[in-house]
Amino acid sequence: MKKNFVPVVLCGGIGSRLWPISREGQPKPFLALPDGMSFLEKTYRRALSLAAGLPVVTVTHQDYFFRAADELARAQAGARGCFILEPMARNTAASVALAARHAAQHWGDETVLLVMPADHLIEPDERFAEAAQRAVQLAGEGYLVTMGIPPDCPETGFGYLEVGEAVGHGGHEVARFTEKPAKEVAEAWLRDGRHLWNSGVFCFTAGCYLAALEEHADSIARAVETVWAGVSGRDWGGREVIEIGRESFAAVPEQSIDYAVMERAARVAVIPAGFSWRDIGSWTAYAELFAADEQGNAVSGDVLLIDGRDNFIHGEGRLVAALGIEGLIVVDTPDALLVADRTRAQDVKEIVKRLKDEGHATATTHRTVLRPWGAFTVLEEGERFKIKRIVVAPGKRLSLQLHHHRSEHWIVVSGMARVTNGERSYFVHANESTFIAAGCAHRLENPGVIDLVMIEVQSGDYVGEDDIVRLDDAYGRSTVTTPCPAA
């Protein structure tokens, strides 16, 4: 690849059609696939195989930074990365503009960006690399390039594009874009061979994109310039972190890159893909990742299915038994169960909307909550008490904090804890415990080389997660009372 080529990973999208395993607290890019890798790790591996010494740029929500950084390190130890952290979602036109602005400032307007969503499955990587090389060549000639996927079914949930005249490097002009056609139209396009699915993978120079954005969506371009004028940067473990101001970013119009730029610009080209591409955007698509039996059933987890047909059943942590069912999606998680007609897979997002409207916690968070230092799982909760299982990774520590309304009793199950409790600092070993009084500054650390696993019993007048004051934090989070989940 060219020396001024930069992969850009867009790590957003809650994936509400994959509820209850995909939620705001752990959205679709971080979901583990059958081979154990997440969507994001697979995307990073593709990006790193193409990068020519420049860091991979990730645009993501500020709450996902630590998890995304971990996924990058898992994809390649010591990989260089720049993280642009958005305080809220403003769709892809603004996200790509931030990445383009960063690239132009650091490496020049001619820097070629390959924009990749973090929630697609693409294989094999070698075929993707060949298509990317052709896209980079066209981008260097001033084109805004997308990758098109030859359709294999009359899909009505994807955007399509019509292939125009050849422009070299295996590419073609895009005659027009069409969003989500009717089924009879999609069936006709499947037969005519002139229409492709729009993959959402784009390639262009930073300067070309910013110029096109200014021409076709000037309100977004101007708002992003205002945002960029107020950004702040810091180094985090050798990775560049760019933090976006909440107030200025809230004023950015919310539009997709497709609508704001690609469907309106003049010099738009498509590279027909020679690789397999799947947007796992629903439970029917997710089910295709698992081998089906002769009756069309696919299962994941500990499942017993008798006399069933055309079902997908996913279980976590306990047995799911089903008898004589047909055409159903059943997804069982520790705190939520989904049962849906398989033909209604696209409508699962309506459940999430209803849950949000009713203020139900399962719309956004799992029982297990990931943190920069590890994770915690709420095991039981009632009036005046809460019980958690806490796992702290080796060498990690929680913030120095206090609680006004609750005390905590810690019991170490395995590993070793270093505890700061007021003015004292001491070790707690397996099968030992300690008590933290309300109002006492405290910190939990794992000085060992294996996970620290402990049970925390909270008791008091109020055990809500917003009763926390951070006095010092190793991860740069707020050191004031905060309504986000603990520690």
Image (spheres, helix red, strand yellow):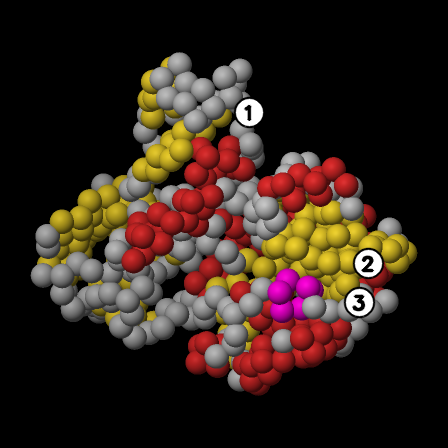
Taking the spot 41% from the left edge, 44% from the top edge, the residue there is 348
Taking the spot 49% from the left edge, 42% from the top edge, the residue there is 282
Q: Residues within 10 Å of mark 2 (few under 14, many from 20)?
A: many
Tell whether label 1 touches label 2 (CB within 8 Å): no
Residue 65 left/right relative to 305: right
Q: Tell which circle, 2 or 1, labels the residue nearer the N-terminal end.
A: 2
Mark linked to residue 267: 3
Q: Tell which circle, 2 or 3, labels the residue nearer the N-terminal end.
A: 2
Closer to viewer: mark 2 or mark 1: 2
Q: Which residues are magenta?
A: 258-263
Q: Tell which circle, 1 or 3, labels the residue nearer the N-terminal end.
A: 3
Q: Position of residue 449 (x, y in %)?
A: 43, 47
Amino acid at circle 3: Arg
Classify 163 as above or below 334.
below
Which residue corresponds to mark 1? Answer: 291
In magenta segment, residue 259: yes
Mark linked to residue 467: none
Which quarter of the picture shows residue 150?
A: top right
Furthest residue to the right? 168
Which residue corresponds to mark 2? Answer: 173
Amino acid at circle 2: Glu
Residue 266 left/right relative to 416: right
Instruction: Using the image as rendered, state which of residue 417 and residue 455 is in the foreground.
Output: 455
Q: Can residue 471 be seen?
A: no
Instruction: Using the image as rendered, state which of residue 161 and residue 80 is in the foreground.
Output: 161
